[in-house]
Amino acid sequence: MPQSSKPPEASKTDALSVQIGAVHMKNPVMTASGTFGYGVEFQDLMDLDMLGGIVVKGLSLEPVPGNPPPRIVETACGMLNAIGLENIGIEAFVRDKLPVLKNFNVPVIANLYGKTVEAYAQLAQIIDGTDGIDAVEVNISCPNVKAGGVAFGTDPKTAGQLVESVRRHTGKTVIVKLSPNVTSVGTIAESVASSGADAISLINTITGMAINAETRRPRLGNITGGLSGPAIKPVALRMVWEVSRAVDIPIIGIGGIMTATDAVEFIIAGATAIQVGTASFVNPSACIDIIAGMEDYLGRHGISHIRELTGSLRVD
């Protein structure tokens, strides 16, 4: 497969470049796990080399069929999904998808999901020995499965123990994805940060449901699902701000980012980078548009580097 077209201009790349653990990214715009497939699906729709990073959909040790359909429902300000972490498994990803991603000059982050601490540790160990994967995003936040995932993400002690295990099994950058469905997100963040996380990403979806009034039945086969899109942006912004006050490691903001202005707001709230999810369903080139818009913002405000914006919220 041929290499992608030329990368962005150096000057623009420098102005937006960020560091997440050991991963250097040309800009802070990443794809959100579960919304961009395995990355390869978008190679004919956009220049993947333009992205700051690709976070592939959640990977487990064995293939997972996911939840029964229907699995996606559009809402007034976003969508509900109950995919159930359907995926081809880590072995098939490394064999069939990763070789294609290696053709692009973009960091690849593997999102990991397991039902036990041992499963997460085994996944981390596999990735540690796999060339072409730059970091892991530990999913302790999925609300659409009945075991694992969110079960680890709602208790600070359990979350910390899981991160400690993953940290022991990989030397690669460890990002931990947090759930909004908790009492104190700052407490969870402190626990995973002290347990070895290099960065934190948040938020995952908020648990919700939709009902068909005519049939009086749920619109999702799983009954409940994860709400994403513009509806959750105010909650996500608040949680990113809270976590930025609780930890000193980089934060990756997620939740309802549809435009460059949305992305800039997350950076101001305390994020070092952001992930784009639901927007890619509406506009496959949303990430590229957001990168261009952030470059324009820096120019209009006379800001030489994106780091000047991080945590710059004025509250007095």
Image (cartoon, rainbow, N blue to C red):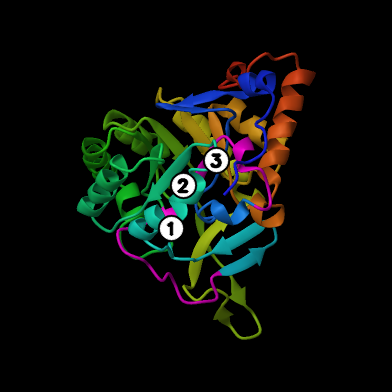
- The one of 271 and 54 positioned closer to us in this rendering: 54
* Quadrant in the picture for residue 47: top right
User: Which is more N-terminal, label 2 or label 3?
Assistant: 3
Q: Residue at x 54, y 36 (%)?
A: 105
Discs 2/1, front: 1
Residue type for callout 2: Pro
Instruction: Using the image, tell me which numbered label, if any, was put on residue 180.
Output: 2
Q: How many marks?
A: 3
The residue at which mark 1 appears reads as: 96
- The one of 138 and 8 positioned closer to us in this rendering: 8
What distance separates the C-alpha of mark 2 from that of mark 1?
A: 33 Å
User: Magenta: predominant secondary structure element?
Assistant: loop
Instruction: Using the image, tell me which numbered label, if any, was put on residue 259.
Output: none
* Quadrant in the picture for residue 87: bottom left
User: Which is more N-terminal, label 1 or label 3?
Assistant: 1
Which region shows up in magenta? 44-71
The residue at which mark 3 appears reads as: 104
Q: Residue at x 21, y 41 (%)?
A: 165
Residue type for callout 1: Asp
Q: Does the segment drawn in magenta span residue 289? A: no
What distance separates the C-alpha of mark 3 from that of mark 1?
A: 15 Å
User: Which is more N-terminal, label 1 or label 2?
Assistant: 1
Residue type for callout 3: Phe
